[in-house]
């Protein structure tokens, strides 16, 4: 297994642990996971082929669908309530 896949597995496990926290404790680690996802997906693609980046992107979108919808709404100037 390549180092990028090991890092991706650790990223997913960290995301699963973060999801178990109450929402007020999810913000900081969730934001860090959100920011580290793009470099991790680029690393996966560079090391293993870009088709694996698409798979990683689908996993990322699945894990962060509610926070991403919230961030997109905030960028449009809406005031949505926090995701549950």
Image (cartoon, rainbow, N blue to C red):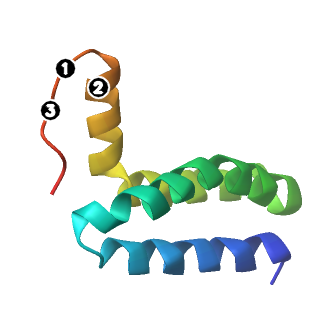
Horizontal side, residue 68 vs residue 44: left or right = left
Distance between mark 3 and mark 2 Cα atoms: 7 Å
Query: Which residue is labeled 1 in the image?
Result: 78
The label number, if any, that marks residue 74 in the structure image: 2
Horizontal side, residue 30 vs residue 56: left or right = left
Query: Which residue is labeled 3 in the image?
Result: 80
Q: Is disc 2 in contact with disc 1, using a CB cutoff of under 8 Å?
A: yes
Q: Is disc 3 in contact with disc 2, using a CB cutoff of under 8 Å?
A: yes
Q: Secondary structure at mark 3?
A: loop
* Up-down relation of residue 17 to residue 44 (above or below): below
* Up-down relation of residue 38 to residue 63 (above or below): above
**Which quadrant is home to the N terminus?**
bottom right
* Up-down relation of residue 84 to residue 13 (above or below): above
Distance between mark 1 and mark 3 Cα atoms: 6 Å
Quarter where residue 40 is shown:
bottom right
Q: Residue at x 30, y 79 (%)?
A: 20
Given residues 25 and 78, the one toward you in this image is: 25
* Up-down relation of residue 55 to residue 17 (above or below): above
Distance between mark 2 and mark 1 Cα atoms: 5 Å
Within 10 Å of the Cα at label 3, are there few (<14), some (14-19), or many (20+) other Cα atoms?
Answer: few
Q: How many marks?
A: 3
| Relative image position of residue 49 (x, y in whole percent) | 80, 56
Mark sitting earlier along the chain (3/2): 2
Quarter where residue 18 is shown:
bottom left
* Residue 40 at least partly seen: yes
Within 10 Å of the Cα at label 1, are there few (<14), some (14-19), or many (20+) other Cα atoms?
Answer: few
């Amino acid at each position: 297994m390549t180092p990028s896949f090991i890092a991706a597995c650790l990223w997913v496990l960290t995301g699963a642990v973060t999801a178990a926290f109450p929402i007020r404790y999810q913000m900081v680690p969730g934001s860090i996971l959100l920011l580290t996802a793009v470099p991790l997906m680029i690393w996966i693609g560079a090391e293993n082929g870009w088709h694996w980046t698409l798979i990683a992107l689908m996993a990322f979108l699945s894990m962060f669908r509610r926070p991403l919808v919230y961030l997109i709404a905030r960028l449009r100037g809406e005031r949505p309530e926090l995701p549950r």
